Amino acid sequence: MLNNHLYTAFYSLYYSHTDMPTNKNISKPTTLHWITLWSLGLLWGCSFFLIKKGLVCYTPVQTASIRIGVTSLAFLPFFIWHFKKINWKNLKYYAIVGLAGSGIPAFLFANAQTEVSSSVSSILNSLTPLFTLIIGIVFFNNKENVRKFFGVLLGLGGAAILILYGKELNTGGHISYSLLIILATICYATSVNTVKKFLQEENPLVLSAVAFQIIGIPSLIVLFNTDFTGKLQLDHEAWVALGYLVILAFVGTFMATVLFFGLVQKTDALFGSMTTYIIPIMAIFLGLLDGEVLEISHGMGMAAILGGVYLSRK
């Protein structure tokens, strides 16, 4: 109950500065929307590091199942509290958002990061806006202007610079693992367009709660049919890794999901997805704090990304 009151206060604070989302009121991004966008970049930028820490002791399936399962449990009180507000006619869209927006990508990223570094994973993730644009136009009849299209390409070019010329960045492993991340970005693009097209009027908290209940129960069933409990009994490091994954679930999934859905509803699918261009920048700065050197290529890449984000605004 306390968590419910705390989150309700957080949610009310966000929407006290902006109107509740409606199809009739989609405005140019405000200062608060920009702050949310960068905050999401920071939250999700740390997610790749936390996944890596979880994989130290757990298999990719266990890592993803813990992340989804813990998040679903965090949303359970809100699911119960808002049960009467759920629009069950949109169940199929809730399912699409749950599976494509969180469930499938969680397993894809966990598998990919057994062979692909966290830095490269975060950069490949920046393909999301490009697929959001393409899928939105082809399957959702979205109308986008030339400036936004150029902004996406500019941001994509910035990400490419970081991949090709970043000194510390190398793909490593097999290309098939990188393709898993690309598939995940296609899933993200499908989810964000679904939210914008069919779930525009939904309360982001209710939307998130329902979506995670759909994918959470199967994830927990899978988890407890592995040697998860055995690892906890025999290995102290398993508890440390679990701690990292719990942080991932609460910060990088629970909180970030609601913020992201609200941002998409208040702006548009493309603007919301541009947060994935910010994630590599966060990764670079985290590297600086860890003693890495900022190269000219990094500056060029970040400048291109920032320019792309700016051009893609409404």
Image (cartoon, rainbow, N blue to C red):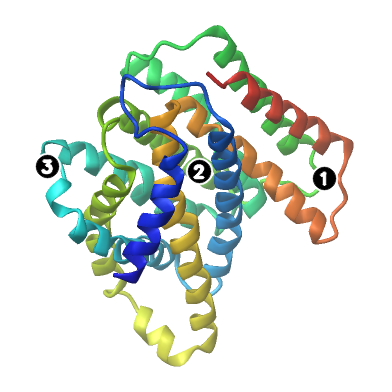
Q: Is residue 75 left or right of residue 241?
A: left
In terms of depth relative to the viewer, which is nearer, 49 or 4?
4
N-terminal of the pair, mark 2 or mark 1, is: 1
Q: Position of residue 136 (x, y in %)?
A: 39, 20
Identify the secondary structure beneath mark 1: loop
Q: Quadrant of the N terminus?
A: bottom left
Above or below for 209 versus 25: below
Q: Are marks 3 and 2 in contact (CB under 8 Å)?
A: no
N-terminal of the pair, mark 3 or mark 1, is: 3
Q: Which quarter of the picture shows residue 81?
A: bottom left
| Residue named by callout 1 | 167
The structure residue drawn at horizontal position 28% and vertical position 53%, both measured from the top left corner, is: 209
Label 1, residues with CA under 10 Å away: few <14, some 14-19, many ≥20: some
Q: CA distance from mark 2 to mark 1?
A: 21 Å
Tell me the mark number nearer the camera, choosing from 3 and 2: 3
Residue, far top: 146
The structure residue drawn at horizontal position 47% and vertical position 72%, both measured from the top left corner, is: 58
Identify the secondary structure beneath mark 2: helix
**Amino acid of disc 1:** Lys
Q: Position of residue 245 (x, y in %)?
A: 48, 68
Q: CA distance from mark 3 to mark 1?
A: 50 Å
The structure residue drawn at horizontal position 26% and vertical position 74%, both measured from the top left corner, is: 225
| Residue named by callout 2 | 181
The structure residue drawn at horizontal position 30% and vertical position 30%, both measured from the top left corner, is: 200
Tell me the mark number nearer the camera, choosing from 3 and 1: 3
In terms of depth relative to the viewer, which is nearer, 243 or 39?
39
N-terminal of the pair, mark 3 or mark 2, is: 3
| Residue named by callout 3 | 88
Residue, far front: 16
**Amino acid of disc 2:** Ile
**Amino acid of disc 3:** Trp
